[in-house]
Image (spheres, rainbow, N blue to C red):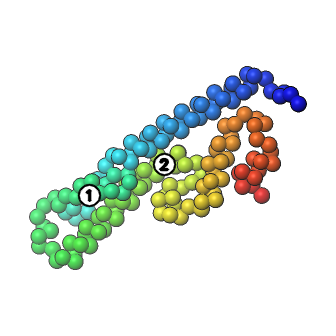
Amino acid sequence: MTDQRHPGDATAGFEAALQTLAEERERLGRMHERMARGTTTTSKDRLLSVVMNGRGEILKLTFNNTRYRQMAPAELAALVTETIAAARVESLNQLADVADDVLPGISFQELAGGEVDLERMVSSFLSASLDVLPPGAVSAADQTRLRGDS
C-alpha cells in the first residue's frame, strides 16, 4: 500500500507542529516569568503588606507602622492570616490570566485548588496534540478514543 499524501503535506504539517510548539514554549515562558514575579497585597487597614510570588510563596512580610504593637495576639494573628490568604488569591488570579492560555480547556483556578478532573485534563492535552497532527496521521477511531468522545 502506498502513501497517497504529497511530501509537501508532511512538511507543512511538521512546520505547523513546530510553530505550535514554539508558541507553547513562549506561553510557558511567560507563565514561568509571572510565577517568579512578586505581587504585593496590603491589609485593609494598611498595617501589613505581603509580597507573594506566583507559586504562593511569601517573599516579604512588612509591617508598615508600629500599630501592631498595641494589638492583641489573636487580633494580630488574624490580620496576618487574612492578609496572606488575600495575597495568595490575588497572586493566583494574576497567574491564572497567563496559565489559562497554556492549559487549554482547564481552569487554572480549579487546578491550583485541586478540583481538576484528571480525565478531562488528559483529554484536553491529547485533543490539542491531535489537532496539530497532519490529516490522516491518526485514524478517526483512535482520535475519538484519545479525545474521550463517546
Q: Which residue is mark 1?
A: 50
Q: Tag 2: residue type?
A: Ala
Q: Position of residue 72 (x, y in %)?
A: 16, 77
Q: Is residue 68 visible?
A: yes
Q: Residue at x 73, y 22 (%)?
A: 8
Identify which residue is drawn at 77% across, 58% down.
150
Task: Out of 6 and 70, give the one closest to the viewer.
Answer: 6
Element at label 1 = strand
Name the side, left or right, on which 85 lies relative to 95.
Answer: left
As rendered, which of 68 and 143 lies closer to the eye? 143
**Residue position marked by numbered label 2 in the rendering:** 99
For the N terminus, the quadrant is: top right
Where residue 42 sits in the image (x, y, percent)?
Answer: 26, 58
Instruction: Find residue 63 and report its image quarter.
Output: bottom left
Residue 76: image location, x then y, percent: 20, 72
Q: Amino acid at mark 1?
A: Val
The vertical placement of 115 against 132, above or below, is below
The residue shown at (44%, 44%) is: 31
- Mark 2 and mark 1: span between their CA atoms? 22 Å
Task: Choose the circle earlier in sequence order: 2 or 1.
Answer: 1
